[in-house]
Image (cartoon, helix red, strand yellow):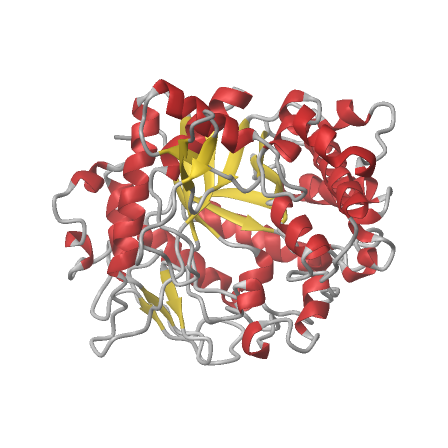
Amino acid sequence: MFREGFVWGAGSSALQIEGAAAQDGRGLSIWDTLCRRPGAIANSDVNDVCCDHYNRMPEDVALMARMGLKAYRFSVAWPRVLPLGIGKVNEAGLAFYDRLVDELLQNNIEPWLTLYHWDLPQALFDRGGWLSPEIPAWFAEYTRVMVDRLSDRVTNWITINEPQIFIGLGYREGKHAPGLKLSMREQLAAAHNVLLAHGRSVEVIRERAKKAAHIGWAPVGRVDYPVTETAEQIEAARRSSFGITEKDFWNNTWFGDPACLGHYPEDGVKLFGKDMPRIEKGDMETIHQKIDFYGVNIYSGLPVRTNAGGVAEAVPAAAGAPATLMRWSITPKSLYWGPRFLHERYKLPIVITENGMANMDWVASDGRVHDAQRIDFTRQYLNELARAGADGIPVDGYFHWSILDNFELAEGFKDRFGLIHVDFATQKRTLKDSAYWYAEVIRTNGDHLSDASPFAAASGATLTGAPGRKGVIESKPGARKPAAILPGGR
């Protein structure tokens, strides 16, 4: 169902799993600061420990290997490597990523490195952050540090994750770090600097990488899809997916067009009018760098149909329509139409850099985590992704979000996205049923999706070499190294 060489992976971000917030010289990030603001995070949760991945990385990679992951998408904590954002490198922090990359490669897992997944150093925010005209140069310096250290082993690079969200929720709505509610003009200036930083980062990777670099980025994908697949309805859904009709960032083209086509979309320029950012000579050339793939994070979409005027309008959800724990609609067709529309517009191979669901998971009395909903969700979405590939869309990979239950930003620890359950009090890891199922999908390169019983692999399945209490790793709370790794892992 998927082409030979398809990349099967899972993802994470440093901010959400590493913990060790004050360990080994790491600097403060804007999320460390937001976590101390009363009421900013659900249940007053903080990111100090998270999954303690910084100290438990080898056992986490061992679990990835036992699942058969072909690739792992992770991000670097910018303030762990450069505590002040620029200047002196923190060798202890940089060495962690050295060890992580080596551990992955030793387990035949390809590293996919994301440079920015939202943990801006607080020191740079204090100097203006994404509003500073200097930040593209700061980001280029940080990129240089990572490329010089890791590009002899890392070939897959993602510059920036979901600019629509960290600008929209961080600088517009104030829900995410740094928790600001700025004017539209300021938001657009920050967004322009993000695009310049992306372009400068690509330039640095191309100039300095020791091995041929495979470069992309990972914006969020807004997908409007036709409920009836006629030519008229498809075209209306396409126009709706790429149109900018509201003064916000919940769209594809405000970031996608400059990066991939070299100009801002006309409808957005007209809509934003006097709030448009100042564009200096050479800016668009800097932003418009050659990238090798269009990474996109897709969780749900909006079904649309044309009205009497031929314009797409949303189809109201039925009462009790399927939704995740975070109330995101479950719309598998978004993983067909999103890749299709984006490839048709930008002419790039597509990589699904995030897809998954929040669920209410717990360890059952039999010691297992039975997350049948996640299995069915992923099966339906992957079947639609396979359909896109069968229709000629070059879909090169899929990264499930996420590998571990984690710190889910403003939602704290209450929403679980992981293939691996984490007991945040003890740091015990337990492979969920979905992890066993996904391992079989990977092993068969997607052929397992056609199994008439999608839950078969989860009902008593074992991973290669996995004994007894399948998939469980127990660690002593606070231990710097894993207390026990079940045999048969690496």
Q: Is residue 3 visible?
A: no
User: Residue 221's spot in the image, x, y percent?
Assistant: 51, 39
What residue is drawn where x is 42% and y is 59%?
A: 327
Looking at the image, which residue sits at the far front? 308
How many marks the image carries: the answer is 0
Residue 233, image x, y percentages: 38, 25
Foreground of the two, 7 or 452: 452
Q: Quadrant of the N terminus?
A: top left
Could you say which is closer to the camera, residue 245 or residue 57?
A: 245
Question: Percent position (x, y) of residue 486?
Answer: 31, 67
Residue in the foreground of this view, choosing between 383 and 100: 383
Residue at position x 63%, y 40% from top? Answer: 246
Q: Quadrant for the C terminus, please.
A: bottom left
The reply to whether residue 359 is visible in this rendering is yes
Q: Nearer the viewer, residue 144 or 137?
A: 137
Horizontally, is 52 left or right of 169 in the view? left
The residue positioned 28% from the left and 62% from the top of the image is 371
Residue 406 vertical position relative to residue 279 in the rendered view, above or below: below
